[in-house]
Image (cartoon, grey):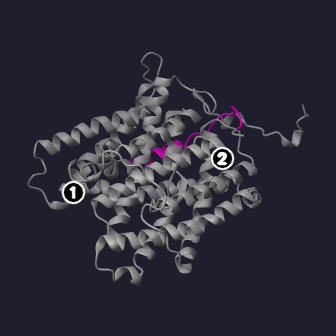
Amino acid sequence: MAEVKPEDMVHHLPMDQLQGLEYCIDSNPSWGEGIALGFQHYILSLGTAVMIPTLLVPLMGGNDDDKAKVVQTLLFVTGIKTLLQTLFGTRLPTVMGGSYAYVVPILSIVRDPSFARIADGHTRFLQTMRAVQGSLIVSSSIQIILGYSQLWAICSRFFSPLGMVPVVALVGLGLFERGFPVVGKCVEIGLPMLILFVALSQYLKHVHIRHVPVFERFSLLMCITLVWVYAHILTASGAYKHTALVTQINCRTDRANLISSSQWISIPYPLQWGAPTFSADHAFGMMAAVMVSLIETTGAFKAAARLASATPPPAYVLSRGIGWQGIGTLLDGLFGTGTGSTVSVENVGLLGSTRVGSRRVIQISAGFMIFFSILGKFGALLPPFLSQYSLPFTALCLELSLLWGSPLCSSPT
């Protein structure tokens, strides 16, 4: 066995270590606990998976059926991308979800005069979606080339923790900006959820049941369950019967129309919206979003390595992960998810919140994404609630996790 050179060794100071971490990247909880933690990550990923289509599909001319199908497709592809990244990419416990960085170039495609003049809404949605698909397919080549040619490895050597922490923090602050205006539209439900999460995860985290810190580890599941029951009681009791229409849309639990619009069984497939169309101006706009997602993903990889107790990923591992992210963006374009690919920063934050960095937990959550995206009716049970109230929680979860460090356990390679 070759001797390790002193200059190749990575030193970790005691002050950087996270105390109380029970499961690092290669250690696995029991199957029961792992399934519960994986389902918790699945719930958290639903916020972005529903918010992006809810924002974009109506502007593209789509109806509730189109929105439900885009949500299912995005979840399905997210599960595939997550499995690919955890098995062949960086092998860090990261969820590869949709990115808000692509919203601006997609909105520019939506407002293209050639699409705006189409009178029929569904036809306009299909034409716009095909243009978005073509732009994603072309722009994914940047990530694939930079990743697999190891050019990004050269660039990533200049990324220091001092530069990465503000990047990841700003992503969390961006989630605050998108989420809290929605909470303000139904403060009687959104605010109790945030208060309940802080109370369970921060002030009751030392409470153990059978030697398991249940409030720290499963605070999200408890918050979702309790607040969902509370919101449904308000809806069923007629609390919003005489309120304004905007309040009913944001507060009632029966106004999302995802369940009624979803099919019982539906398997997304490539080119389901038709053949993609390609335009140079659309593609160049999407390339700008790709560069933003590269920086965001690199910072999230480094944060996930710390919170999962893995050694800092070498430059070639980061570059390989970027290459697989490009494959994920290519899948987004082929399937038609309506957005590009990036690391779900809120799920990285949940690693620090629960202090469980197991790779298997993330792979289980990917299985939930694929399973519930195929069984449309069951998968649509939670999104109507999560799309309104979980995004502020994800931002809060991320900001809390940035306060913590992590110990050395093993290498993601």
Tell me the tag on residue 388: none
Disc 2 marks which amino acid? Gly
| Residue 236 visible, this angle | yes
Q: For residue 368, which quarter of the picture?
A: top left
Disc 2 crowd, CA 10 A, few/some/many (<14, 14-19, 20+): many
- Identify the residue shown where x is 38% and y is 79%: 115
Residue, x 60% and y 46% (percent of image)? 84
Which dot, 2 or 1, sits closer to the camera?
A: 2
Numbered disc total: 2
Tell me where residue 52 appears, x and y as whole percent.
40, 59
Based on the picture, tell me whether residue 249 belongs to the magenta stretch.
no
Residues drawn in magenta:
393-411
Name the residue rendered at 43%, 60% in the picture: 272
Left or right placement of residue 149 versus residue 224 in this view = right
The quadrant of the picture occupied by the N terminus is: top right
Relative to 10, say whether 318 is above or below: below
Q: Quadrant of residue 381?
A: top left
Residue in front for this viewpoint, 181 or 34: 34
Task: State the residue position of label 1.
Answer: 249
x%, y% of residue 227? 28, 39
The disc labelled 1 sits on which kind of residue?
Ile
| Residue 256 location (% of width, % of height) | 25, 53
Q: CA distance from mark 2 to mark 1?
A: 41 Å
Residue 158, horizontal then vertical, whole percent: 74, 58
Q: Is residue 239 above or below residue 197?
A: below
Quick one: 155 or 124, which is closer to the camera? 124
Tell me: residue 281, above or below residue 308: below
**Residue located beneath label 2 in the image:** 89
Residue 403 included in the magenta stretch of the image:
yes
In this view, the residue in front, 43 or 73, is: 73
